Each structure stands twice: as structure tokens, then as C-alpha cells.
């Protein structure tokens, strides 16, 4: 039988009624002749509650025990989903990560999937099981301990299963009905996309769009897994949602596919750094070791042997970044006069594979922002994206203006 992977996020399984609704969707696919692998998240709010228990119990907790605790939310959902399907006379059973097994690295709370042997589940399909309900977000380390994949890890679990079982498709059910040209809460002209290329989705996910976890899109692109993003709260048709697929599967693309934003950005500048070979490594090496997600980087022109080095990072990492920079200065490895920190910026990005073959996209973006009186602090570009840092108070205006200027409301 062909295999279909269906993933249900926390809001889609938040109550027993919603689990029943999700189970009915699974039953529809079973009736079509699929063997179905269902990946479930913890019920909405459950993981936060478990994390709270850990933090209240131990400030400097053992990461192995943390994983054992926070992974339990998915186990509950998997069992409830399997029971619900059984009540519908659909042969189903629940699977925890170690039972499959989902083999991962030993990086607790941030593990990466290394292998998913299909033999155990395929054997049960052969014996008459129609649905394998798998707890997402979790696996087992080489030492035999439970691991978790980080927030949003159930998306990655779903795509990894689709790749391992050569599934026909991987459907991600969430609280939105697809991928939009931008956030509909900010721009009422935002349009749902029928299709989007893997590369575009990867950029949008990494730039702030919350629909799919970045690692799940990376996996889907690598293994050519067709992803479909759907709402679990609306009636479905075969054309529902947004299909994330190869560029070749899209007949004609707009120059710009979407506008993404990240509200919680900070800009940090090391002022008057001694300009010599190795300064970038001296700065960004310790920042990487401290786990700082550095994004945009700019080095000013050197004057009298001194230069300024600017970079952006999430606002919740500023304190750690400051500590790492203080360590660099204290070591005497690098001489600079001070650190300028601006925590009132936002990142705005335009993304589109059509930018490869169209000139003038960046200049149009800059003109639009200029016409609105919005000053650009930092710019970075790639083949299919342009990102800028601006004052946070102008974020919504920038998103709306760019959406209008590139006419993204039009198909």
C-alpha cells in the first residue's frame, strides 16, 4: 500500500474533540487505501507546562532528564489518537521514538535524526495495522537515552518519516490553511499560495515565517519530499493548502513570493576595532561557541587602522553575546573602544526564486522604504532574498508597503 504521512500540531490536538476531528481526517485517508503514519505533537500548552516544571525543579538541570520529561507530552497525544482511531474501528497503535526506533545524535534538547529503520512499522502494516501513530519531537540516542529535537521538532519528525518510508506526500496540519505571501495579521491583502518552491520556503522559514520549522524544509528539499501545509479546522479538498515542492513543479513564479519579518532582532556594533587579519575569526568564533545566532554582518571601511564591526542577533541572545564580547576584550585578543547595542530593530525580507532572473528588485525595495521615510540600517542579500534592518516601529508599515509594491495580492 502507498504510505502517507500526516502531522498534527499542538493546536490540532489541543482537546479530545480536536483529536477526534483529526482522527476522522486520518480515517478518510485510510479509506482511500493508504497506510498512514501519523506524527503528533503534544497537546497545545503541554510542553510549556512541562518545561516550567523542569525550571522550577532545577535551574541547572540535567539535559537528559529534561528530554525524558518534555517528551512525555507527545506520548500522551499518541496514545489518545490511537485509542480514538481504534474506537472508529481503524487498526492503529501508538509508537514512541525509541520503539520505531528514531535514531538520533546525543545532543539532548537539540538532537538531529540520523536514521529511521522502517522494518518495525512495515512489519505491523503487513500484519494488518493501518495507522502508526508516532510521538513526534523525540528519538533515542546511541546511549539509549530519550532525546528531543528542539522546538518545532515534530515537523522534522514528519518529513524524516516521509523520506524513510518513501511516502507519497507529507501533510502538515496546523492552525493556518497554508503559506501566505506575508502574515495576514499584519497585511489584510496577504494571499495564500497554492505552491511554493523549497528554496523560497526555506528562506521564509529562516527569516521569521512560523509555518514550518527550518530543519523540516531542509530535509524535505534534500529528499524531495512533497510537503503540504493544511488547516485542521477547515473542510479539505485535494487542492487545499499550500504545496511545498521543487522549483520545476511550479509553472510560473512571481518575482517575489513573499515578505517575511522578524520582530525581535538586535543590532550590535563593536566600535573602533583594530583592523588586522583574523579579527572576524576572533569575534565570531567566541560568539559561535556561546551559541549566538549571528545573522547580518557588516564591516566598515578601515580608517587609521580601525574599523567598526556590526552584526545582528535575536534580542534574547544579547546578554550572552555581550558576555562573549566581554570575554574577548578581557583576553586581550582584540582591542576595541566599546559596544553599541540597538534592541529596537526589526528584520524585513523579500524572497523569491524569480529574483534570479530579474534585475532591479533590491533597488525597488529600497525605493519603497525610502518613499515611506524608513531608514535602512543594515542590508544583506542572497540569490533569492534581500533583507534589511529597520527601526521596529516601522515594521508593519514596511511589510504592507512592500506587499503592495510587488503586487503580491495578485496570483
Image (cartoon, helix red, strand yellow):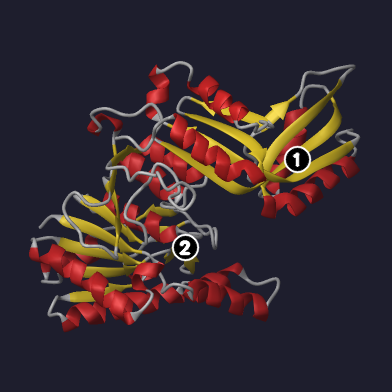
Query: Which residue lies under the disc numbered 2?
Result: 141
Residue that appears at 35% across and 39% down: 222
User: Tag on residue 371?
Assistant: none
Foreground of the two, 259 or 405:
405
Answer left or right for 54 relative to 229.
right
Mark 1 sits on what residue? 268
Count residues near mark 1 (Cα–Cα under 10 Å), then give few for <14, some for 14-19, many for 20+.
some
Residue 264 visible to an observer of this rendering? yes
152 up-or-down from 382: above or below = below
- Cα–Cα span, label 1 and label 2: 37 Å
Front tag of 1 and 2: 1
For the point 36% across and 47% down, the residue is 179
Secondary structure under tag 2 reads loop
Quarter of the picture containing the N terminus is bottom left
Q: Residue at x 27, y 65 (%)?
A: 38
Task: From this view, report whether residue 152 is shown above or below residue 310.
Answer: below
Q: In this view, does 124 lie to the left or right of 266?
A: left
Side (left or right) of 383 relative to 232: right
Which quarter shows the C terminus?
top left
Q: In which quarter of the image is residue 372?
A: top right
Amino acid at each position: 500500500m502507498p504510505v502517507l504521512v500526516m502531522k498534527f500540531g499542538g493546536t490540532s490536538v489541543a482537546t479530545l474533540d480536536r483529536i477526534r476531528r483529526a482522527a476522522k481526517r486520518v480515517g478518510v485517508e485510510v479509506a482511500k487505501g493508504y497506510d498512514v503514519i501519523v506524527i503528533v505533537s503534544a497537546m497545545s500548552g503541554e510542553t510549556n507546562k512541562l518545561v516550567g516544571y523542569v525550571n522550577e525543579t532545577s535551574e541547572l538541570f540535567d539535559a537528559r532528564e529534561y528530554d525524558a520529561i518534555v517528551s512525555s507530552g507527545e506520548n500522551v497525544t499518541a496514545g489518545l489518537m490511537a485509542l480514538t482511531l481504534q474506537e472508529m474501528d481503524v487498526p492503529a497503535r501508538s509508537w514512541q521514538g525509541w520503539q520505531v526506533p528514531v535514531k538520533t545524535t546525543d545532543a539532548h534538547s537539540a538532537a538531529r535524526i540520523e536514521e529511521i529503520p522502517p522494518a518495525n512499522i512495515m512489519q505491523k502494516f503487513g500484519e494488518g495495522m493501518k495507522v502508526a501513530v508516532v510521538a513526534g519531537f523525540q528519538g533515542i540516542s546511541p546511549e539509549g537515552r530519550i532525546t528531543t529535537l528542539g522546538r518545532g521538532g515534530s515537523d522534522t519528525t514528519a518529513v524524516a518519516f516521509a523520506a524513510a518510508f518513501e511516502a507519497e506526500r507529507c501533510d502538515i496540519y496546523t492552525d493556518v490553511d497554508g503559506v501566505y505571501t506575508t502574515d495576514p495579521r499584519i497585511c489584510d491583502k496577504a494571499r495564500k499560495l497554492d505552491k511554493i518552491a523549497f528554496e523560497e520556503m526555506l528562506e521564509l522559514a529562516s527569516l521569521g515565517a512560523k509555518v514550518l520549522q527550518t530543519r523540516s524544509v531542509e530535509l524535505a528539499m534534500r529528499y524531495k519530499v512533497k510537503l503540504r501545509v493544511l488547516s485542521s479546522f477547515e473542510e479539505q479538498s485535494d487542492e487545499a493548502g499550500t504545496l511545498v515542492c521543487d522549483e520545476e513543479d511550479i509553472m510560473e513564479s512571481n518575482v517575489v513570493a513573499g515578505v517575511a519579518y522578524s520582530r525581535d532582532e538586535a543590532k550590535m556594533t563593536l566600535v573602533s576595532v583594530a583592523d588586522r587579519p583574523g579579527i572576524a575569526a576572533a569575534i565570531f568564533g567566541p560568539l559561535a561557541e556561546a551559541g549566538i545566532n549571528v545573522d547580518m554582518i557588516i564591516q566598515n571601511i578601515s580608517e587609521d587602522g580601525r574599523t567598526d564591526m556590526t552584526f545582528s542577533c535575536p534580542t534574547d541572545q544579547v546578554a550572552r553575546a555581550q558576555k562573549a564580547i566581554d570575554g574577548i576584550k578581557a583576553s586581550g585578543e582584540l582591542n576595541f573602544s566599546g559596544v553599541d547595542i540597538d534592541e529596537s530593530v526589526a528584520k524585513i525580507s523579500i524572497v523569491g526564486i524569480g529574483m534570479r532572473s530579474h534585475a532591479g528588485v533590491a533597488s525597488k525595495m529600497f525605493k519603497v522604504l525610502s518613499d515611506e521615510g524608513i531608514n535602512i540600517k543594515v542590508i544583506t542579500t542572497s540569490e533569492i532574498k534581500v533583507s534589511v534592518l529597520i527601526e521596529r516601529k516601522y515594521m508593519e508599515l514596511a511589510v504592507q508597503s512592500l506587499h503592495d509594491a510587488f503586487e503580491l495580492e495578485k496570483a
